[in-house]
Image: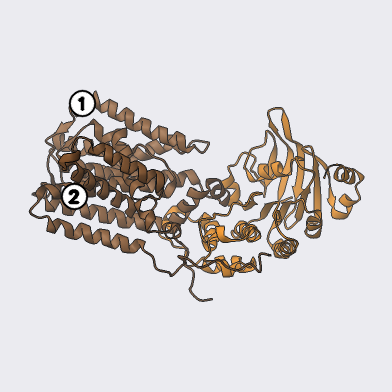
Chain colours: A orange, B brown
Amino acid sequence: MALLQVSGVTKTYGPLKALDGVDLEIGAGSFHGLIGPNGSGKSSLLKAIAGAHFPTTGRILFDNDDITAMPPYQRSRRGLSLKFQITSVLTELSVYDNVLLALQATEGYGALFRSRSRGRLDDEVMGALERFRLAGRADDLAGELSHGEQQWLEIAMALAPRPKLLLLDEPTGGMSPEERRVTGELLAPIRRHCALVIVEHDLDFIKNICDRLTVLDQGRVLGTGSVAEIEGDARVQEIYTRRV
Amino acid sequence: MTATTRAAPPATARRGSFRILPAIELAVLALLLVVPFLLADRPELITLLTNVVILSLLALSFDLCWGFSGIMSFGQALFFGVAGYGVALVGRDLEFSQLWATLPLAMLAGGALAAILAAFLLLGRKAPTSIFVAFGTLTGAYAAERLVAGWQYVGAGNGLSAIKLMAFGEYEFVEGLDFYAVALTALVLVYAASRMLVRSQLGLVLAGIRQNEERLAFFGYRVQVFKALVFSLAGMVAGLSGALYSYHQGFTGPSNLGPGLSTTAVIYCLFGGSGTLIGPVIGTVAIEVLSYVLADIDAIRQFWPVLLGLVLLLVVTFQPTGLLGLAVSARERIGTYGARKAAR
């Protein structure tokens, strides 16, 4: 049984069809890339999976639960985590508090008021920051970080509660080549406990870290397969040489 | 320049550096403790100071809503006024005014009413906009003011006067130092509890909500429930304030639960500095004392409200962080929440 199963998902905005009968299956521990030209529906699909908007028709199963109409907080509690396309770290809070905020989300109201887990979570917060090379910036405001560091912080926040599936929307957008390389290195170890769905325009980056790719075009799935299969697909080559 | 090589910015107002906010809090507490004894021969000033302390609670309740949770409530007077009417009616109809029962009940009434309003305004299927909440609370206060103004049982437009004195056992509290002591004790207790709330891990959630509600939902937080919780707690604080005010004034009327007083609480808070807890107290003291002093100057007796209004307008327009923003950095105001071990 797949960890995530998207069946016949359609999303319409008036006359515009952002998604048109999309099917997708993601297995546990799999790294799956979503590629396609601008406006092909990649981010719309990610948002439908995360709950940022609900599909017009179709069904989304996650870990055997139907999450199609669930609000984002319930999906998150079931182990689904999202990193937005536009960096959305909390710039007025410290780097440390951003990660603490992500980690303590499952605590009850009383426990939060009594700050019961503040001490206990310290090691986890610093561990997450160390993994993403941000431990030295823990006391800085998140808004003081460079763009690349903010992207890493946001991935660290998304991974902190140990989700089963991480959705990354253009994680290397605006990064230097060196930062992209490091980002790939930082993501590789999460495969042990987490599957990944990633939307990315940098095809070299996505080919290096993903096992499988799904190509979207005009809201429809053009093809799904291994990196080699997709690279050899004439239809994919055609849309990329035509439109990217 | 890559992320890994970028130099850290100058360390300003970081963990462990000097913080001015606690010093200001202590200074205000010391003043509120000492000044009444210096004014012992001026009972009218003790009355003024008692009013200031009671209204500080109302301003504090608005700060919990707006300054810490991003809820623009123009209805804090609704909870204030309902609790005030409540203790007045209990005194009139049941001949009962023991503070150990009526003050907690007033808090419960304010909190319950706020929870009901929150269920309508905040807990709908879709997250409400700030404007919706602002107009919803404003409408609630306006409707309540109109309702009591036409309701004979609660005195209609004349309100309720000669309210039974607040008592503890046989002892009755009249205007003066003893009533001031009760009001100040209430303020200190509420302030301490509010401070604990906003500096806790729950306060971190509120800080996150203020900045990006949507992001918090994707972490797994039920954002609107957190807001409803704080709104209800703020309603309890406003209820306590309203009960003390009614007892102290010996009177309550429709204007005590309308938009006028609600807006005054907003101004107290913004003038002093929202999101600080102590700012609303400073704002209330400053505005009430300034009003008292200006009204006593012959040369401006006719138009002092205009002068005061101009001062408030200038501060709110050009100093959005209020008076406290002149001394307290944004970093300190927002604060840090983790329990990071010092050395690693």
Left/right placement of residue B306 relative to residue A84 reads: left
User: Percent position (x, y) of residue B257?
Assistant: 28, 34
Front one among B184 and B8: B8
- Up the image or down, A47 lies above or below B148; here it is below
The residue marked by circle 1 belongs to what chain? B
Left/right placement of residue B24 relative to residue A13 reads: left
Res B230 seen here? no
Front one among B264 and B122: B264
Q: Residue at x 32, y 43 (%)?
A: B312
User: Percent position (x, y) of residue A61?
Assistant: 68, 44
> Dot 2: within a 10 Å radius of its alpha carbon, few (fewer than 14), some, or many (20 or more) residues?
many
User: Percent position (x, y) of residue A1?
Assistant: 74, 50
Quadrant into which the C terminus of chain A falls: top right
Q: Residue at x 17, y 47 (%)?
A: B48
What amino acid is labelled 2 in the image? Leu
The residue pinned by badge 1 equals B157
User: Percent position (x, y) of residue A234?
Assistant: 92, 45
- Label annotation for residue B49: 2
Q: For the residues marked 1 and 2, what is the alpha-carbon distance in whole angstroms?
A: 27 Å
Q: Label 1's element? A: helix
Q: Residue at x 40, y 50 (%)?
A: B321
- Up the image or down, B207 lies above or below A238; here it is below
